[in-house]
Image (tube, rainbow, N blue to C red):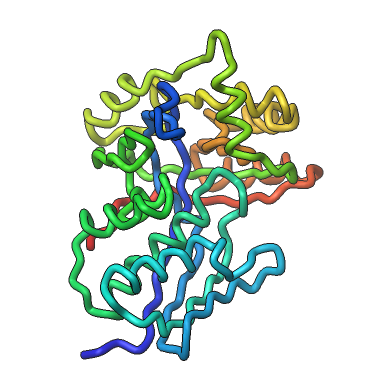
Amino acid sequence: MFMEKITETAYAKINLGLDVLRKRADGYHEVSMVMQSISLADTVTLEKHSGLVVQTGRSDLPGDSSNLAYKAAVLMAERFNKTPDVKITLDKHIFMAAGLAGGSSDAAAVLRGLNRLWQLGLNAAQLEELAAEIGSDVPFCICGGTALAEGRGEILTPLPEPQEAFIVLAKPQQAVSTAWVYKEFDSLKEPQHPDIGTLKAALLKGNAVLPLPGMGNALEGVTCARYPEINKIKKEMLKIAQYALMSGSGPTVFAVAGSTQEAQKIIEALQAWKLETAIATTVKRSVI
């Protein structure tokens, strides 16, 4: 039966581990990351419409060709000879420009949604291949869960998911340029590298409990040096939390909490700060 309307959940991600190996000849960076989906999510609705429209409900997020969700729709239409007569509505909850892959997750949701709306029958691997043309984090966001991401982020190896954990998120007001962070990282004489191999091994044992050995973020030192508030947030979180780390290129910091009560205490400790905050849980891989 032909579908008129599709709703997809676009989950945010955090980086349990993020290492930068080198700058590639194509201008991208070779990375080794362990990525984890969390329950903080946007809702993406797709429905038949006259022409392509992306509604974001936010004045600071245009729905034009600069939006990854828009780009995903155009790519799918061009690749499968479809007229993109679809209205895409983004109900945003993921912090923006935060290191949580909000835009990438929305784009992945559009790919999944159009696959269903247009009854294309694409599998996860085919969708991930298309996703890599839009952005480095988009392939992971197709199925999410827990995965090792290599290359520029598009080479994915699913990993056993850890036990469900409570994640507290806090984002300061600073806008962080990902391009700037990577450029600064390239100039470091002795960059710090997390032990992705140890982290991967801990997950492969199965039934792992966060936090895990090997967790870390090679970009954290760069971003924290420019924005000291990130370190201050970490220190405040660690008065209560078991572990805290910056996600992606920042500025969001996440903490691993042992319970909902502990998570709420962390949120309360940050109330005086001008932060976007949320409590989430880890999310398992989706099946397509």
Q: Residue shown at 63%/33% (left/top)?
A: 180
The image shows residue 240, relative to residue 8, as above or below, that is: above
Q: Position of residue 150 (x, y in %)?
A: 32, 33
Q: Position of residue 22 (x, y in %)?
A: 42, 22
The image shows residue 186, relative to residue 122, as above or below, that is: above
Q: Residue shown at 25%/42% (left/top)?
A: 158
Q: How many marks?
A: 0
Q: Position of residue 235 (x, y in %)?
A: 68, 26
The N terminus: image quadrant: bottom left
Q: In the displayed image of the protein, which residue is found farthest to the right?
A: 272
Figure quadrant of residue 231 = top right
Q: Residue shown at 56%/9% (left/top)?
A: 189
Which residue is at the front of the view, 209 or 139?
139
Figure quadrant of residue 254 = top right
Q: Position of residue 118 (x, y in %)?
A: 27, 80
Q: With 256 as the anchor, is 204 left or right in this view?
A: left
The image shows residue 58, relative to residue 283, as above or below, that is: below
The image shows residue 24, relative to residue 160, as above or below, that is: above
Figure quadrant of residue 202 = top left
Which residue is at the front of the view, 186 or 244?
186
The C terminus: image quadrant: bottom left
Q: In the displayed image of the protein, which residue is found farthest to the front?
A: 25
Q: Residue shown at 48%/44% (left/top)?
A: 166
